[in-house]
Amino acid sequence: MKPVNVKLTKPLQSSFKIKKICLPVLEFNWHFHSEYEIMFMNRSRGKRFIGDNIAYYEDGEIFFIGPILPHIWYSPAMNGGEKRHHEAFLIQFRNDFIGLDAHEIPELISVQNLSCFPQCNTLKILKNYAI
């Protein structure tokens, strides 16, 4: 299955987008976009597909995904018969979200080197942390 190129929208006068996701089911929507993405899975368990990597995820995991990298979090329902919604927080931003190209900012060089963005992999930052 080919991923869909999603054109993200952001509020006018905004340099990034923040969204709270609260859904009973996470549908399979294989996609990519030109923005960076930070996804905090506050209360959600299921299977994630990021690039060519497929693995399970659980509550409290955070992911930092580079642009143009196909990805999806999938869970038909919460495991174990639980009656709760998936809850996640999403931040998306362009390479120039602070007015400069991220490659020109010395403080961001180490972040860029953590994972060979934009097309290699994702960085799983933290596990088992909940707010």
Image (spheres, rainbow, N blue to C red):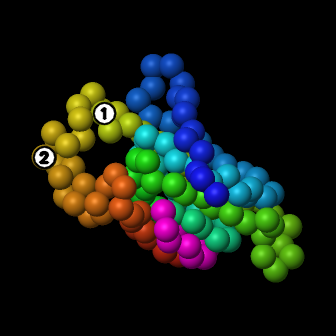
Q: Which residue bears the numbered disc 1? A: 96
Q: x and y percent of residue 50 in the render?
A: 51, 63
Please report the residue visible at 80 percent of the width from the left and 57 percent of the height from the top. Answer: 24
Amino acid carrying label 2: it is Pro
Q: Is residue 18 visible?
A: no
Please report the residue visible at 68 percent of the width from the left and 63 percent of the height from the top. Answer: 74
- On screen, residue 52 above or below 13: below
Q: Please report the bounds of the magenta region as a residue range.
A: 51-61
Q: Quadrant of residue 19?
A: top right
- Report the disc number at residue 87: none
Q: x and y percent of residue 117 in the render?
A: 31, 55
Q: Seen from this angle, which residue lies furthest front? A: 1
Q: Is residue 64 visible?
A: yes
- Quarter of the picture containing the N terminus is bottom right
- Quarter of the picture containing the C terminus is bottom right
Left or right, 116 with reference to 29: left
Please report the residue visible at 44 percent of the width from the left and 34 percent of the height from the top. Answer: 16
Q: Which residue bears the numbered disc 2? A: 106
Q: How many marks?
A: 2
- Residue 36 falls within the magenta-colored stretch: no
Q: Secondary structure at mark 1?
A: loop
